[in-house]
Amino acid sequence: METLHGKIKAVCISGKKGEQKHAVESIRLVPHLGIPGDAHAGDWHRMVSLLGQESVDNLQEKISVRLYPGAFAENILCEGICLYKLPVGTKLKIGTAVCEVTQIGKECHQDCAIRKQAGDCVMPREGIFVSVSEEGEAKAGDTVEVIL
């Protein structure tokens, strides 16, 4: 099977859970923590979240609210890989870090910021979550590579 590649469009963090994230220049991915300074950091299975730009674009066509990186509380917005079709356990090289897919989708809390504004949220259906295996850094323009 061939190796799959994608590109990071944006890296995002937030200070509080339940709010939209904002784009930053770069993020550090740390084992047993995730992203220092992000509200979802911690030693659990949903340390870091990823969402495909394609998923955002599909919803953007249906709504009038302008969607920006971090709108769905994703840490990493990327394009070129159908993230939600990757099986749990898939290893990804994200920038210089190595991560492992731990969950596909999630239960949505109905009061999330984007659902209130747009009436829908793609994260529960098409977002993925990873734990960090090897420390590294990621920024817009870096590659995301499926390690098979």
Image (cartoon, grey):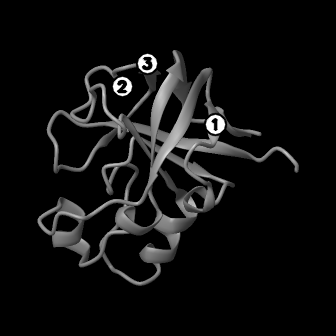
As drawn, 133 above or below 142:
above
Q: What is the CA distance from the residue labelled 3 to the residue labelled 2?
A: 9 Å
Which numbered disc covers residue 70? none
Q: What is the CA distance from the residue labelled 1 to the residue labelled 2?
A: 18 Å
As drawn, 134 above or below 103:
above
Q: Nearer the viewer, residue 92 or 77?
A: 92
- The residue furthest bottom is 62
Residue that badge 3 annotates: 31
Q: Identify the element where label 1 is drawn.
A: strand
Residue that badge 2 annotates: 35
Q: Quadrant of the C terminus?
A: top right
> The residue under label 2 is which amino acid type?
Ile
Q: Residues within 10 Å of mark 3 (few under 14, many from 20)?
A: some
Q: Identify the element where label 2 is drawn.
A: loop
Whether residue 31 sits left or right of residue 101 in the image: it is: left
Of labels 1 and 2, earlier in sequence is 2
**Residue at the (17%, 60%) spot, across then down:** 113
- The residue furthest right is 1
Residue that badge 1 annotates: 91
Of labels 1 and 3, earlier in sequence is 3
> The residue under label 3 is which amino acid type?
Pro
